[in-house]
Amino acid sequence: MSVDLTLLFVEKQVEAVRLCAALTEPYATGTVPIKPDALSKEYSFIAGKLQSSLNELKALSETIEADAKKMEPGDLRNARQRIQTMVAEISRGAQDYAAQVRFYQAMNAGGAAAVKAGLDAFENVNRATRELVVEEDDDQPNEGSELAPAKDEEPADPTLM
């Protein structure tokens, strides 16, 4: 599967997981009652999806780095930027869910232990996002820089100014 298509699938999966935060928030805040074990299963499922998305991004990043010499510079830069964006989205999602779990624990002392596994899973995903850093090539031109700088020894042609 191509890099762009794989990235699109991962992006949509992470987007769906982030949207699920709106679904679990009423349960975490206590607006809608739920058994702690059921909420824990939901959080574990969501954390698993975030982790699998992160694992796909890691594999894709390794593939891109291995094929870096074969790719066009613009395509390579675009793929790296999209991966970094998705890693940030996964981290943000894990932080949002961890906050939900902490709020639930604070409001429901009796169910706090049941959702502890979900909190640990989200914190592990957040930590794992810090490990994935896409490196930039130094031989690529910087954004906005001259692609072919003028030679200093040749005088400027006044008709071109």
Image (spheres, helix red, strand yellow):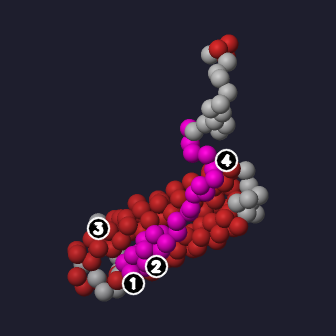
Using the image, determine if residue 92 lies above or below residue 52: above
Q: Amino acid at mark 4?
A: Gly
Q: Which mark is residue 44?
A: 2
Quote the CA–CA distance across marks 3 and 1: 18 Å
* Residue at 35%, 81% in the rendered image: 115
Q: Is residue 122 magenta?
A: yes
Local packing at callout 1 (Cα closer than 10 Å; few below 14, some 14-19, many 20+) is some
Q: Nearer the viewer, mark 3 or mark 1?
A: 1
Task: Look at the image and tell me whether residue 77 can be seen.
Answer: yes
**x then y, percent, for residue 17:** 50, 64
Q: Earlier in the sequence, mark 1 or mark 2?
A: 2
Q: In this image, 73 relative to 115: left or right?
A: right
Q: Earlier in the sequence, mark 2 or mark 3?
A: 3
Which residue position is annotated with label 4? 74
* Residue at 47%, 60% in the rendered image: 88
Q: Amino acid at mark 2?
A: Ser
Q: Amino acid at mark 1?
A: Ala
Q: Bounds of the magenta span?
A: 119-144
